[in-house]
Amino acid sequence: MTKRVRTGVTGLDEMLHGGFLEGAAVLVQGAAGTGKTTLGLQFLYTGIVEEGEPGLLITFEEFPSSLLRDAQEHGWDLRALEETNKLRILFTSPSILLSSLQSPDSPLNDTILRWGIRRVVLDSVDHFQRISHDPVALREIYTTVLNALKREEITSLLTREVSGTRLQSQHDKLAYVVDTILMMHYVEVNSAIERALLILKARGSAHAQGIHKYEIKPGGIFVTERFEGLQGLLTGMPSRMPPR
Amino acid sequence: MPSHNTLLSDIMEEMDPDVLVFIKEHISSFTRWDVIRFLHENPNTEDTAENLARFVGRAPHVIAGEAREMAEEGILRAETASGHTIYRLTTDAQMRQLIADLVEAARDRTFRMKLVYHILRAGGR
C-alpha cells in the first residue's frame, strides 16, 4: 500500500483519505490570493516538523524574505528550519532550475540527495512560459521537472495561477502529467466572498468529491464543511438549488 | 562643533574593524550594496546577472560587471551551466558572517549615513 503524505491542512487530509500518495505530483491551481502558496508552505512545514521530512521550496518570483515573513504570520518559523538544514528556499529562474535538474552534479541535485529532500513546492509553474509558449515544449519541460522529482520519490506540489473557472482542457498539458489537481476558488455567497476547495483529480486514490469551504487564518488553511444546497459554485456566483 | 566630514570620519573609526575593512574592500558602489543586501536576505538565490538585475532594479550590464568582480573577490560564487553564468552568495562562513554583520549594522540610520558617505567618497554609484 502506498504511503500517504499528510498536508497538515485540517479537513484536506480527510478529503484526500489521508493525504497525497507518496511521490505524487500535485497541481494546486487558483486565482491570486486563494492561498496556493500558503498551502505549499503548510505542506512543507508539516512535513518537516511533524513527519521529519526535509523540504525544498522553489520560488521564481516571490522573494524568500517575503515568504519567511508570511510564514511567520502563521506561526511557522521557516528561518529556523533553514538554519538547521531542514528546509531550503531556492530563489531562481525557470531556465536555471531546468538546467540544474538536468545536471547530476548541480548544487540543487546535491542538496536533494544529501539532505534527503522528501517534499518540494514549486511556486509557480506559470513562469515556465518564460522559456516557451509552445505547448509541446512546455509539456516536455513539465515532464523533465516532474521526472527529476519522481526519480527521488519526492512528493511535489506545484502552484498555478488560474483566473475564472478553468477546469481541464485538451490544451492543458500540465493537467495530464500531474497525479492530483486541487482547485482553490472564490465564490460569492449571500453577497460575501467565500473560499471553495475541490479535488479535481487524484490518480490512483479515492477522494472526496464535494466542494468544501476553507478559511485562511493564523495557523494556516482550514478546510471545513461541504457547500450544501448550491449549484454553479465553480462559476463563482452560485444559485440555490431548486427544491426537489 | 565638529564639521560634517570630521563627524563622519570619526564614526567610520568607531566601526567594527572587520566590517570596516570589508566595506573599504568590497562596497564601492550602491549597486554592490544592493546586490549584497538582497543576497543576504535571500541567501539561496541562484540566478544570472540579468535576473539579479531585475530583482534589485538595476541595469543588467551594470550588474553583470559588478557580479563578475564580486565573484573574483569571493563574495559571490559563479558557475557556468548550459551557457549561463549563475551567481549565488558565497558559502564561505566568514564572508557570510561579515555580510550579516554589515547588513545588521546598516539597520542603524547613522551607520547607513557612514556607508553612503564612504561610497560617495569612493566615487561609487
Image: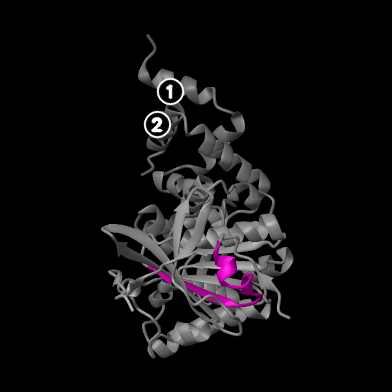
- Tell me the chain of label 1: B
Report which residue position mark 2 lands on.
B117
Colouring of the image: one colour
Q: Earlier in the sequence, mark 1 or mark 2?
A: 1
Above or below A45: residue A2: below
Which sits in the foreground, B73 or A188? A188
The answer to whether the residues at label 1 and label 2 have Cβ atoms under 8 Å apart is yes
Q: Residue at x 34, y 74 (%)?
A: A234
Looking at numbered disc 2 in the image, what kind of residue is underneath it? Tyr
Tag count: 2
Residue B20: give x, y in percent of width and height: 55, 32
Q: Residue at x 64, y 79 (%)?
A: A150
- Magenta stretch: give its range: A11-30
Judge whether residue B87 can be spotted in this image: no
Looking at numbered disc 1 in the image, what kind of residue is underneath it? Leu
Residue B62: give x, y in percent of width and height: 38, 56
Report which residue position mark 1 lands on.
B8
Above or below B63: residue A173: below
Residue projecting furthest to the left: A191
Residue A71: give x, y in percent of width and height: 52, 50
